[in-house]
Image (cartoon, helix red, strand yellow):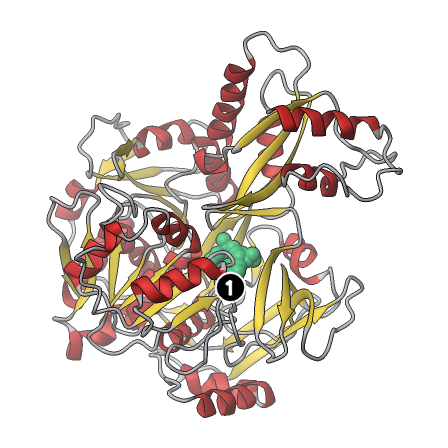
Amino acid sequence: MQITSFEQYEADYKKSVENPEQFWGEVAQNFQWRKPWYKVLSWDFTGPNIKWFEGAKLNITENCLDRHLATNGDKPAIIWEPNDPEQDSVTLTYKMLHERVCRFANVLKRNGAKKGDRICIYMPMVPELAIAVLACARIGAVHSVVFGGFSAKSIADRINDAACKLVITADGAYRGNKQIPLKDVIDDALIGCPTVEKCIVLTHVRTPVSMLKGRDVWWEDEVKHVNDVCEAEEMDAEDLLFILYTSGSTGKPKGVVHTCGGYMVYAGYTFSNVFNYQPGEVYFCTADIGWITGHSYIVYGPLSQGATSLIFEGIPTFPTPSRFWDVVEKHKVNTLYTAPTAIRSLMSFGDEPLNGKDLSSIRVLGSVGEPINEEAWHWFDEKIGKGKAPIVDTWWQTETGGIMISPIATVTPTKPSFATLPLPGIQPILVDENGNEIEGNGVSGNLCIKFPWPGMLRTTYGDHERCKQTYFSTYENLYFTGDGCLRDEDGYYRITGRVDDVLNVSGHRIGTAEVENAINMHAGVIESAVVGYPHDVKGQGIYAFVIFPEMHGDVELTKKDILQTVTRVIGAIAKPDKVLFVSGLPKTRSGKIMRRILRKIAEGETSNLGDISTLLDPNVVQEIIESAAKA
Ligand code: PRX
């Protein structure tokens, strides 16, 4: 199923559009099914109702583990590189990983978990995180991984939305020179989570934690009580595999639902092709498993293809900005898949951290999560790839399950800052505000997808109507991505960023409404408005305009109080970079905040703010401009 020439890409693409069912039916033959499907696809985008590989039975862990045992059992499945470079790395072969997943699957059963139950996972980037994810899939439980940077309240909201029965966590996590008290955060969260019966705690940082009788058990104790034989649960292709929460333009994050069969095929197919993965190579994706990139391209995609996936616990700059390059050299990494934020951050340290580092193992480079600017693209290409490693700029989303528009390494001619061409099976179209297709090349518009693909979301957990409203109602019969996009003269796609109220801060997706709600929870705040502004390293920074009429302490302390409130409500990742106190916000007569104006002010623009005559009080604009200039 691997594409090896551009001609083959063109032929496969053509076939995938003309005969999608035959195309995906053939791709799916490369996976192991307990029972075949009777229909490859049935769909409508109005419901939406999407079913892939109907009638088929499988377990994704048999594809990620069991099927590799006979031929590749002793091959490394996971290499773990710890936060502290002085600590030893760990290698788990496919046999070892299989054994540990089965054992932990039995622990889950012993603690009352069964097929269909939802399990929340809040863990550091350690091999046990991948083991926990796969153990859920083994027994047919639905995992909901929550990124380690979210607050107790965010976790509680996610646990309650999915009515999770179990939580898997650790005493704490390391992040550079910081320690994050994961179990403490979980304890705070669980005060408000009546559905949680058990909490399994891994020892990692060895910090003291509270263990509640009847609810909390240690991972290390539990695994002693079970054996390592656990037959995989037979799942329907459309049974739920996982829920992953993501931000949108409204306040509450949505639980994006992915199902077993289609997701597996899509994650595996795209992994193998986009990175041109070759047997024996070491593949390093720097994302956290708490995000979709980690789900699809640290765990399921690579393991379904028998690859060696490197899991890194730390951050690029600890203990020094050479850390990534040391990891590459130590483990002879062949593919490095990272985010533009990390590239820009490392670029800012100059060439020194690269001196003497052997990066000759690198064959393919990848970028994901946000638009990559040309400067960062060239730096990555020249300094890391030495001009020889193709860069795959992969555009996709939590909702798409896998990479959608991207070069295929060694096959597609690349172009700086372009995600280039759609993968086989993906039919992008650009539309104008009214949903009319914008045809031809050298155009830009809103990016939609007009035909289903196996990895697409099926619903938003517990609220199908919301799925329909968010993705399938803006434009009739189209999946709307929320992204703006241009298609150049060569038909190459370049993603220009979100066209809705979603920010992309260091590759993390954050809704402006979510941040505003958090700020408004501060006792002194009357109202706030949040916009993004260009940030050299993070891509976008968060700028908050806040009405706070009766300030008691000093301004700087009050700003810190607001940041602390946001950290409590959402997590440190959503902390505004700038807070400006204002006496009013630019609103239309109907009460709508004109963010367009705030965005311009946040970008430093003082004139050319466009038409402000429709504002209720145009004077407020001048006042905001003046305070912004002083801040
Ligand atoms: O705006 C796009 C941006 O990230 C959004 C999806 O965020 P999330 O669901 O968190 O998934 C991120 C990892 C797949 C998209 O709507 N985005 C993602 N990849 C790119 C990108 N923007 C430009 N270029 C990319 N390669």
Describe residue 408's horizontal placement relative to residue 138 as left or right. right
Type of amino acid under label 1:
Trp
Q: How many marks?
A: 1
Describe residue 156's horizontal placement relative to residue 587 as left or right. left
Question: Eyeballing the image, is 254 above or below 531?
Answer: below
Quadrant of the image occupied by residue 360: bottom left
Describe residue 401's horizontal placement relative to residue 410 as left or right. right
Pick the front one: 70 or 621: 621
Q: Residue at x 20, y 55 (%)?
A: 355
Q: Position of residue 323 (x, y in %)?
A: 23, 49
Q: Residue at x 12, y 45 (%)?
A: 87
Instruction: Say whether residue 98 is visible.
Output: yes
**Residue at the limit of the structure toward the top, as seen here:** 552
Question: Eyeballing the image, is 142 above or below 601?
Answer: below
Describe residue 287's horizontal placement relative to residue 68 as left or right. right
Name the image quarter holding the N terminus: bottom left
Q: Position of residue 385 (x, y in %)?
A: 31, 68
Cβ at disc 1 under 8 Å from ligand 1: yes
Pick the front one: 219 or 620: 620
Q: Residue at x 47, y 85 (%)?
A: 25
Instruction: Say whether residue 103 is visible.
Output: no
Pick the front one: 314 or 166: 314
Instruction: Classify 10 Å Cα crowding around label 1: few (below 14), some (14-19), many (20 and above).
Output: many
Q: Position of residue 20 (x, y in %)?
A: 55, 85
Pick the front one: 45 or 435: 435
Q: Name the residue tied to disc 1.
A: 396
Name the image quarter holding the C terminus: top right
Q: Secondary structure at mark 1?
A: loop
Q: Residue at x 22, y 72 (%)?
A: 281
Q: Position of residue 619 (x, y in %)?
A: 82, 26
